[in-house]
Image: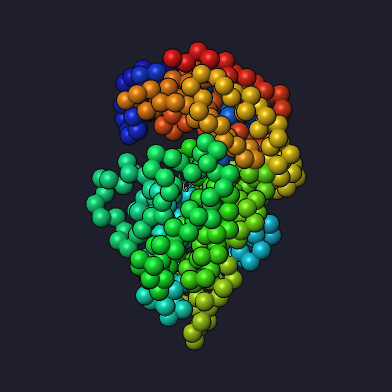
Amino acid sequence: NVTPNDLSAFWMPFTANRQFKKAPRMFVGAKDMHYTTSDGRKVLDGTAGLWCVNAGHCRPKIVEAIQEQAAELDYAPAFQMGHPKAFELANALVSFAPQGLDHVLYTNSGSESVETALKVALAYHKVKGDAGRFRLIGRERGYHGVNFGGISVGGIVTNRKMFGTLLTGVDHMPHTHTPGKNQFTRGEREAGGEDLASELERIVTLHDASTIAAVIVEPVAGSTGVLIPPKGYLKKLREITKKHGILLIFDEVITGFGRLGTPFAADYFGVTPDILVTAKGLTNGVIPMGAVLVSSEIHDAFMQGPEHVIEFMHGYTYSGNPIASAAGLATLETYKDEGLLTRGAELAPYWADALHSLKGLPHVIDIRNLGLIGAIELEPIAGQPTKRAFSAFVKAFETGILIRTTGDIIAMSPPLIISKAQIDELIGTLGSILKTLE
Ligand code: PMP
């Protein structure tokens, strides 16, 4: 068992991680829906790791694909040279991506996918001869990873405040019309989406459309507490961006690969962006990898000039590397073989009923769900805005379920292989814990 000394070299910067060092929660194994802890307990994974292990843990097909690839061709660059699996994976991805998103750029994480998408958007306007479009628009409470572009368009003050000017030329759409209200929660989201999206028109008027390159949003924000947009919001954003020649980017790092019961959130909401950002579930969380899907129109704009290609200096050493590509292919095959990209739709009513059975428990002020994602928002203790949910998290872990918290919101996103009995166990256990919270 670990001593505090064993934990000193690894810098874990968040407050919650400092708490961890006082009471380590160590995983030493995992299989399907469960983790095994260092003290030999099984913990039901209610969060798919960090929203990524969509097919469940240590799936043999994915493990074997990685092992075989590592033995056969460990590393090869996927630019200037190539290897078959990077091409196969790109084809497999576009085969079920929203129509029109036909080209793939590889990255190694969600944060890198976001940076890639923002750079593609800016470069696209340049190659089209529309160099005046330099502004990027995000949204309050948006989360787009931790790199500079991502925190600039992101809307979380704690992630931004230490880093100076960040990217310039960035603006943010509001999260709500009414101070004190949150239009993504508490029954407010049944209507008003079009109105809220129309705030983009105000920003366009302020800066002029000819200066705006792209708008980036998470279709459903995960990390900031499972924030589901009010009805009509995304459709209206699409309408406004199209009208003004602004690119629309969906950050589907969490919502991609079946989380909402459709392959992508774009399918769920019936709104196709120009650029779609993925990571996490692409390789079932097993190997770091991300992919950015772009429309033919964007891709083709770069295919000009005497060599039929404009230099777009962007790529990573590990972009589309063989082992990640093999893991991605095996993951997509697993999703397909087991129907996981739509399983969330089959389970959604059961999941919704289970979550809403917690209504009326002490401190519960909102319950949100879509597909196989869900959140329970708790009334914060005055002056201690994270304490109540964090105490639920610690008790849950000790009782044998893994949940996630952000502020006083408990978020859940189980692997898509979860059974109904396991949903009962997850939500039943959470319910008994909520009853004991101060
Ligand atoms: N975008 C979204 C919507 C995310 O949820 C995350 C991670 N939670 C990221 C980007 C960043 O991904 P990564 O941690 O792989 O860099």
Q: What residue appears at the point 69 percent right and 37 percent down from the top-left corner?
A: 348
Q: Position of residue 34 (x, y in %)?
A: 61, 26
Farthest top residue in view:
436
Q: What residue appears at the point 44 percent right and 33 percent down from the top-left corner?
A: 406
Q: Position of residue 373 (x, y in %)?
A: 59, 37
Q: What quarter of the picture does the C terminus occupy? A: top left
Along the viewing direction, whichever of 72 and 138 lies nearer the viewer: 138
Farthest bottom residue in view:
306
Left or right: where 411 falls relative to 332 = left
In the displayed structure, 360 sits above or below 203; it is: above
In the displayed structure, 147 sits above or below 300; it is: above
Q: Is residue 158 visible?
A: yes
Q: Position of residue 318 (x, y in %)?
A: 48, 55
Q: What residue appears at the point 71 percent right and 31 percent down from the top-left corner?
A: 350
In the displayed structure, 130 sits above or below 98; it is: below
Q: What residue appears at the point 44 percent right and 58 percent down from the top-left corner?
A: 199
Quarter of the view holding residue 381: top left
Q: What quarter of the picture does the N terminus occupy? A: top left
Left or right: where 162 falls relative to 245 = left
Q: Position of residue 428 (x, y in %)?
A: 62, 19
